[in-house]
Image (cartoon, rainbow, N blue to C red):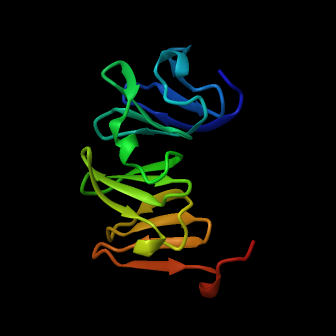
Amino acid sequence: LSNMITSFTQSDDGSIWMGTYGGGVSRLLDGRVRNYTMANALIDNKVYTAFNTANNDILIGTRNGISRYENGVLRYDSRTTLLPDPKVRHFLESQNGDLWIATYGGGIAQFRGNQLVKIWNTESGLIDNIVMKMIQREDGSIWAATYGGISIIQPDGSVDAITTSEGLIQN
C-alpha cells in the first residue's frame, strides 16, 4: 500500500478501495489489504479516482484510462478507447444512469452503458477542458469544476458558467 492516497470509495461488501499515486489501488476488507497494480491487470499504477457504481462495479480512473473490478475480476474498461483524454479525474452516475467521466484535458465523456453519448468540451460550451470533479443537482444539471471555473450543463444541453466575472475568487 502506497502512502500517497489520491481517492477512495466503499463497495457494497464493505471494502474500502484506495487509489494511490504510483502504487496502484488497494482494497481493504476485514482487516486485510489486497493490492492491484499493472502486474495484475490495472491499466496504470497512477490512480486519480475510484468509484463504486450502482451495479457495485469499482471503476478506477488512472492517467492512462479506466480499469473495472467486476464480479471479482479486474480488467480493462473498453470505454477508455472512446475518452477524449486518457487521464480520468472523476466519475459521476447521473439520475438517469448515465456515466459521466471527467478528464484532465479532454473535457467530459458522457456514456449510456458502453455507448458514448457526447463529449462535453470547450467546443460544446465548457469553460475549460481540465475537469476535476462533478456533481449533479436536484434539477438535473451537472456542475463541473474546471481550471476555468464552474461549467453547468443544463438538462436541455445548454452550458452556463460561473467564473471570476460572476464573483469566483481569482487564484
- Relative horizontal placement of residue 170, taking residue 10 as reference (left or right): right
Which picture quadrant has residue 150?
bottom right
Q: Residue at x 52, y 56 (%)?
A: 133
The C terminus, quarter of image = bottom right
97 is higher (above) or lower (below) than 135: above
Counting every numbered tag in the picture gives 0
- Relative horizontal placement of residue 97, taking residue 130 as reference (left or right): left
Percent x, y for residue 23? 64, 25
| Identity of the residue furthest to the right in this view | 171
Which picture quadrant has residue 136?
bottom left
- Relative horizontal placement of residue 66, taking residue 21 as reference (left or right): left
Q: Which residue is drawn at 47% across and 59% down?
A: 134
156 is higher (above) or lower (below) than 11: below
The answer, for residue 105, to whether it is visible in the render is yes
The N terminus, quarter of image = top right
The answer, for residue 36, to whether it is visible in the render is no
Percent x, y for residue 35? 55, 18
Q: Which residue is drawn at 26% across and 51% down?
A: 97
Percent x, y for residue 60? 47, 35
145 is higher (above) or lower (below) than 43: below
Q: Residue at x 50, y 28 (%)?
A: 16
62 is higher (above) or lower (below) than 159: above
Q: Which of 111 and 139 is in front in this view?
A: 111
| Identity of the residue furthest to the bottom in this view | 165
Which picture quadrant has residue 79?
top left
Q: Nearer the viewer, residue 151 or 16?
A: 151
Percent x, y for residue 58? 40, 33
